[in-house]
Every structure is written in C-alpha cells, then in structure tokens.
Image (tube, rainbow, N blue to C red):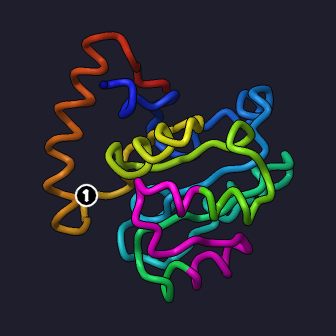
Amino acid sequence: MLKMFCPDMYLDNIYDIDIEYIKKKNIKGLLIDLDNTLLPWNCCIIDQDLRDWVKKCKKYGLSLCIVSNNRARRINECAKELQIPAVTRAIKPRKKAFLKGLSILGIEKNQVAVIGDQIFTDIFGAKRMGIFAILVKPVCNREFVWTRLMRKFEGIILKLMIRKGLISMIK
C-alpha cells in the first residue's frame, strides 16, 4: 500500500531535478503543482530563477503544464507569465486533471512526470495514473490550514518509506 504514496524521486526542490536523467527516461512533459512546488503558497511573484528553470526545461524539449487544486485567476496569471498552460481546480488526486494535462501537452502518461510537494495529492494522483512521480520539499511553511494538518500524516509516511528503504533523499 505504501507504494501508492511513494515518489520515484525525492528532492529538495525543482532546481535539483536532473533534466538529462529525465530525458533519458523518455519523459517529454512535466505536470507541475504550483503552490509550494514552484512558488510559495498563494504567491504570484515569479523570480528569475524560476523563469530560468522553465526556459531550461523548454530548451531540453520538455513541455510543461501547471496542475493546481487552487482557483483559476491566480494560477492562470502565473501560467501566463511563465508562458505555460495550466489546469486549475484540479481536485488532485483525481485522475481527470492529470488526463487534462496530458491532453494539453499531447503526450502519453509514460512520457510525463508529475512534480509536487504533497504526497496525498500530487504523488498519490501520479501513482494512480501510473505516472513517474517527483516529490519536492515545500518551498515555504505558509500554507492552507488543511494542508498543514495533512503534512503531519505525510511526515509519518515519509519517515516510514525512508526507514523501509523505499525512498531516499537525492541531493
């Protein structure tokens, strides 16, 4: 059962993703969470590092799409500024949002990776779909109250997966 919550990679942040490794796995697209993965929760200030990372991904031929449970207005503003599409009000871990992201990118599920900061939404949703899953640490501690509660359970599961050797932190 733990395998449904187990990421294929666990990293400090998006900048630690080895894009050449991703390309060798035949990954052509990334479905990426926004809040606490790309930006702090409820923030829409995009710094140069994030802009450069998006450009680097595109340079390597990766297509990107934001998939967020949050409301459309802010997510779409951020997506427009980054010049990538977005799926809003995703209700992750439901499959529908991931399928919509795949459709937008025009690729198959075996050619995409999901990147997110939450086990119960991003990683579980990816695993339900049979998609390569990358877990990153949240970019800040500020978050929705429900998410803070879920983090306690995620912490327990993460420690258990690490203790059982199912994942390790890649630096």
Closer-to-camera residue (32/88) = 88
- x, y percentage for residue 106? 80, 58
Q: Is residue 30 above or below residue 45?
A: above
Q: Which of the 4 quarters of the picture holds residue 15?
A: top right
Start and end of the magenta stretch? Answer: 76-98
Whether the magenta-drawn stretch holds residue 90 is answered as: yes
Left or right of 84 in this view: 162: left
Q: Is residue 90 above or below residue 140?
A: below
Left or right of 117 in this view: 67: right
Q: Which of the 4 quarters of the picture holds residue 49?
A: bottom right
Residue identifier under label 1:
141
Q: Amino acid at mark 1?
A: Asn
| Residue at screen point 70% across, 36% down | 110
- x, y percentage for residue 37? 46, 55
| Residue at screen point 69% across, 56% down | 102
Question: Which quarter of the rendering shows the N terminus?
Answer: top left
Left or right of 27 in this view: 67: left
Whether the magenta-drawn stretch holds residue 73 is answered as: no
Q: Residues within 10 Å of mark 1 (few under 14, many from 20)?
A: few
Q: Is residue 108 above or below residue 49?
A: above
Considering every residue shown, the one lying at the far bottom of the view is 73
Closer-to-camera residue (161/128) = 128
Q: Is residue 130 above or below residue 93?
A: above
Q: Which of the 4 quarters of the picture holds residue 130?
A: top right
